[in-house]
Amino acid sequence: QVQLVESGGGLVQAGGSLRLSCVASGRTLSSAAMGWFRQAPGKEREIVAAIVRRSSTTYYAGFVKGRFTISTDEAKNTAYLQMNSLQPEDTAGYYCAANSFMAALKLMTPGSGSWGQGTQVTVST
């Protein structure tokens, strides 16, 4: 099992930026792929971005539209989500996830797999 701890959420005005961080500890093979999901009130959790750590292969949801960038720092065992041009519709709880494979990570649901506790992002108008 992998333990994940997120940080970096907060309140920002529309058009602003935030960088989320997720520190992973535990079984390295179980975090070969890392990603970010988000969940707004009354909505299902949806994937935002994912990365395969060894190859740096990335995946982005369509609504990201070039605004977000996922990356990792292997020395720090940390994944980042740089979010630019934030809009009110980006307001949600953001959750870090880890899996052995990106394909499996993209299909993760709450309660299955390795998840962080979440960090709130609020974008004001």
Image (cartoon, rainbow, N blue to C red):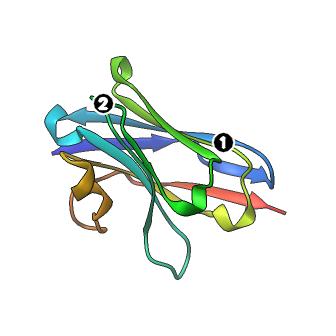
Q: In the picture shown, does residue 118 fall above or below 73?
A: below
From the viewer's perspective, is 38 left or right of 103? right
Residue denoted by label 1? 18
Q: Which amino acid does label 1 sit on?
A: Leu
Q: Mark 2 points at which residue?
A: 55
Spatial CA span between label 1 and label 2 = 25 Å
Which residue is at a point 49% across and 59% down the rendered structure image? 61
Report crowding for label 2: few under 14, some 14 to 19, many 20 or more residues within 10 A (C-alpha).
few
Residue situated in front as seen by the camera: 6 or 35: 35
Residue 52 % position (x, y): 31, 38
Where's residue 97, x and y in %?
A: 33, 51
**Residue drawn 17% across the image and 42% down it:** 30
Q: Is residue 17 left or right of residue 8?
A: right
Horizontally, residue 55 falls left or right of residue 60, namely left
Q: If you read the primary sequence from the N terminus, does the residue marked by circle 1 or circle 2 appear first?
A: 1
Residue shown at the point (39%, 30%) measured from the top left: 78
Pinpoint residue 53: horizontal percent, then vertical percent. 31, 32
Q: In this view, does 50 lie to the left or right of 20?
A: left
Looking at the rendered structure, the secondary structure element under dot 1 is: strand
Whether 32 is drawn above or below 112: the answer is above
